[in-house]
Each structure stands twice: as structure tokens, then as C-alpha cells.
């Protein structure tokens, strides 16, 4: 194992697991202690495989290894692609004792995790996230699943990984647009729960977008710590965990409308957080200055603060009507109560929401 790494833990009793964060971890650590049997199926995609698959193969000494290489992109986070994982597992005679390894971004992680939750009614899996977004968010917390043409992440399961291995060196090959997308989820933690982190992000944004390794490691560590704390308190989103959905009610509507592809998840969440901040401001929950700070940090991270051209308030209302947080047909949103505090609520005036939608859809 590399000397320079930091460790966190998601405290969930016998489903708890470590998150290891460091430089140069891929290929330099032995992950076989996290494999319950002796067979491993690495799930990755055709962009990540040429970059990192060989290194990861070295992390499982003594195991029988197979791999399945999926097509790249959000548009492939669906049943057909999921079935390719099941096909590979069955063709290679993988048993209940097998361990799946998700090597890639959030799309690979969500699908490999869902396959692990379902295959022979549940097998172990390990997360090796290689995008900033996956390192700060999707690899932690056990939400897995696929999209439906009518709604984002509509089919899935909660299934926690056995460990998360974050090698920050992988970010050096990531396109800049994907760094910005990952920063959306990082900023989210500051907005919902961590005012000091938010201030640090405002000061450090040029180092982060410039791929400064120390700044990125700090942002990843603090993001994972925040998510681990929330998940440990509310694994299945009975209450508190919903704050991790800030910007996602609007953002998921954008992604679904765009057909899963033109808008990256992080970009849609960036625009969605701007809309949530606008509504919070209209409701008197945050000041004009707070709203300006949200816009400024999103812009400095290279994120959009407006919605796709042609999207109407009706598009939003129809798509948000299937949001998973809704109860008895009532829309629930994550709103800010100052910067660094958020709540899930259905107590907002429909007129204020209509005004926010009208302002953004023009
Ligand atoms: N489960 C959760 O809690 C959770 C949280 C947030 C987001 N998500 C999901 O995650 C997905 C978004 O994840 P994402 O932003 O990682 O997108 P992604 O998985 O599509 O990865 C982005 C792009 O980067 C490529 N890539 C990955 N690693 C690379 C590397 N090191 N170098 C070069 N290219 C690399 C990928 O092949 C892809 O083209 C969405 O489907 C979203 O719904 C899930
Ligand atoms: O982990 C969570 O909980 C989140 O909400 C994290 C989000 O960033 C992530 O996009 C998640 O997949 C959204 O979950 P969903 O339940 O709204 O589909
Ligand atoms: Zn998200």
C-alpha cells in the first residue's frame, strides 16, 4: 500500500467500510482482503479500460479475474447495458461468492453496484472511482441504479460497497469539463452542511480548476467525510439524507429532458442548485448576497447557472412530478436556509416556484 493515503470510514455497523484517498494507490495496493471469495469481475468502460484496467488487475493477487467493458456514457446507464454485466457473470460462471469491482465514473459505479445488488440476490462490490464526481459522491453511500427514459435513477437499490479506493492521480487524465461537473457536488456539500468548507472552496477554486493535487485531495477528503456522516445517520433517505439532493429535483428534470447525454449530471446539478438558491431567496430563506455567492462559486467552477434553451416551466413540472422525494403527489424540494444549511420541504408557495421557473425558462 502506498505510504501517502488518508482513510475515512462510513459507519454502518456490519455494512460499514473504509474510504482510502491518496496518490498512486492504483496498482500499489492489495485489495484481496476485501474479496470474500476468490473471483473478481471488473466492470469498466471503453474510455477507462485502456487507462487503468491493467493497474487494477494487479490489485487482486491470487484471484481469478474477468472483466466486462461497457460502452461509455450516461445514455448507456440502462437495462441493456446492465444485462451485459449479468451476461458476463454467467458466461464466466461467477458464483454468489464473487466480487464486482466498479472501475470508472458514476455511470459505471451505479451500474456495477446495481448488478452486484441483484446478481444471485446480492454479491459484494468494491468502488474504484476515477472521476472527481465519483470520488466525492457516487462511490460513497450505496445508491445504485439505472435511468428510465421517463426519469433519472428510477430503478435501483441501496447496496453498500465493501471499500472505496480513490487514487487522485486518475484525475490527471480527466477532461476539464468533467472536473467542473465534479465540483458541482463538492460545492453542494458546502451549501448544505459545511459553511467553512464553502468559504475554503471560494478561496481555493482556481487551484481546484487548475488540478492542484493538494487542493483536490483536500476537497475529496472533506466531501467524502461530509457524505459519510450523512449516510451513517440516514442510510436509506428516511429524512436527513435528502439534503444530498440539493439541486437534483431541477437537475434530474434537465438530464431527462436532454435525453441523458448532452448535459452532464454535475452540470445539471449546478443549474439546479442555482434554481434552488433562487427559490430560497424568493422565499426569504437566503439573502440577495447569499444568492450572488451561489452564482459566483458555480460560475468560478465553470458550471452553468441557466437551463437548456427551449426548456419550459411545463417541462420542469411534468418531469419533477415523478421525483422520488415526492409524497402523495406533493413535490418536495431541498431549500437553503442560509449558506451551509438545507432542509427538505413541501412548504413553499407554488407562485414562488412558478416565478423561479419563469425566470430561468426564457
Ligand atoms: N450513486 C450516487 O450516490 C450518485 C451520486 C452522484 C452521481 N451519481 C451518478 O453518477 C453519474 C455521473 O458520474 P460521472 O460524472 O462520473 O460521469 P461518467 O461516469 O459518465 O464519467 C464521465 C466521463 O469521464 C470518463 N472517465 C472516467 N474516468 C476517467 C479518467 N480518469 N480519465 C479520463 N476519462 C475518464 C468516463 O468514461 C466518461 O466519459 C450519473 O449517472 C449520476 O446519476 C450517482
Ligand atoms: O447519495 C445521495 O443520497 C444523493 O442524493 C447524491 C446525489 O448526488 C446523486 O446524484 C444521487 O444519485 C441522487 O439520488 P436520487 O435518489 O435522487 O436518484
Ligand atoms: Zn448528484
Image: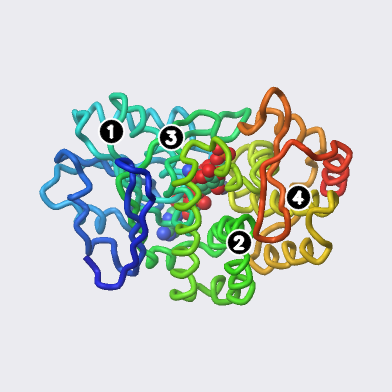
User: Mark 4 = which residue?
Assistant: 275
In which image quadrant can residue 110 be found?
Answer: top left
User: Mark 1 = which residue?
Assistant: 123
- Position of 290 relative to 105 (above/below): below
Which tag, 1 or 2, sits closer to the chain's start?
A: 1
Please tell me the numbered disc located at residue 190: 2
Secondary structure found at label 4: helix
Q: Nearer the viewer, mark 4 or mark 2?
A: 2
Whether the residue under disc 1 has CB within 8 Å of ligand 1 = no
Quadrant (top left, top right, bottom left, bottom right) of the N terminus: bottom left
Q: Are marks 1 and 3 in contact (CB under 8 Å)?
A: no
Q: Is residue 301 visible?
A: yes
Measured from the top left, where is residue 211 in percent x and y? 50, 72
Secondary structure found at label 2: helix
Measured from the top left, where is residue 5 in percent x and y? 32, 68
User: Mark 3 = which residue?
Assistant: 158
What is the spatial separation of the Cα atoms under label 4 and label 2, in whole angstroms? 17 Å
What is the spatial separation of the Cα atoms under label 3 and label 2, in whole angstroms? 25 Å
Count residues near mark 3 (Cα–Cα under 10 Å), then give few for <14, some for 14-19, many for 20+.
some
Amino acid at each position: 500500500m502506498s505510504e501517502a493515503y488518508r482513510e475515512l470510514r462510513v459507519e454502518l455497523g456490519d455494512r460499514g467500510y473504509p474510504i482510502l484517498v491518496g496518490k498512486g494507490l492504483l496498482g500499489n495496493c492489495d485489495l484481496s482482503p476485501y474479496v470474500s471469495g476468490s473471483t473478481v469481475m471488473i466492470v469498466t468502460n471503453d474510455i477507462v479500460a485502456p487507462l487503468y484496467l491493467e493497474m487494477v488487475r494487479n490489485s487482486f493477487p491470487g484471484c481469478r479475474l474477468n472483466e466486462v467493458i461497457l460502452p461509455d456514457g450516461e445514455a448507456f446507464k440502462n437495462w441493456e447495458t446492465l444485462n451485459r454485466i449479468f451476461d458476463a457473470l454467467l458466461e464466466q460462471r461467477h458464483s454468489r461468492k464473487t466480487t464486482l469491482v466498479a472501475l470508472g465514473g458514476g455511470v459505471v459505479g451505479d451500474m456495477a453496484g446495481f448488478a452486484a445488488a441483484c446478481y444471485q440476490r446480492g454479491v459484494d462490490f468494491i468502488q474504484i472511482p476515477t472521476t472527481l464526481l465519483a470520488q466525492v459522491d457516487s462511490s460513497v453511500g450505496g445508491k445504485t441504479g439505472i435511468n428510465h427514459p421517463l426519469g433519472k435513477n428510477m430503478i435501483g437499490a441501496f447496496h453498500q460497497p465493501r471499500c472505496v479506493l480513490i487514487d487522485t492521480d486518475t484525475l490527471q487524465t480527466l477532461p476539464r469539463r468533467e472536473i467542473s461537473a465534479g465540483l458541482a457536488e463538492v460545492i453542494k456539500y458546502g451549501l448544505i452542511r459545511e459553511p467553512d468548507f464553502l468559504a475554503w472552496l471560494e478561496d481555493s477554486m482556481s487551484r481546484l480548476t487548475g488540478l492542484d493535487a493538494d487542493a483536490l485531495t483536500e476537497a475529496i477528503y472533506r466531501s467524502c467525510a461530509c457524505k459519510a456522516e450523512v449516510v451513517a445517520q440516514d442510510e436509506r433517505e428516511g429524512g436527513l439524507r435528502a439534503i444530498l439532493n440539493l439541486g437534483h429535483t431541477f437537475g434530474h428534470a434537465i438530464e431527462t429532458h436532454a435525453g441523458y447525454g448532452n448535459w452532464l449530471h454535475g452540470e445539471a446539478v449546478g443549474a439546479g442548485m442555482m434554481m434552488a438558491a433562487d427559490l430560497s431567496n424568493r422565499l426569504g430563506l437566503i439573502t440577495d448576497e447569499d444568492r450572488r455567492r451561489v452564482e459566483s462559486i458555480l460560475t468560478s467552477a465553470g458550471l452553468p447557472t441557466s437551463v437548456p434553451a427551449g426548456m419550459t416551466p411545463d417541462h420542469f413540472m411534468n418531469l419533477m412530478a415523478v421525483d422520488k422525494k415526492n409524497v402523495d403527489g406533493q413535490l418536495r424540494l431541498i431549500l437553503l436556509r442560509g449558506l451551509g444549511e438545507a432542509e427538505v420541504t413541501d412548504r413553499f408557495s407554488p407562485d414562488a416556484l412558478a416565478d423561479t421557473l419563469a425566470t430561468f425558462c426564457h
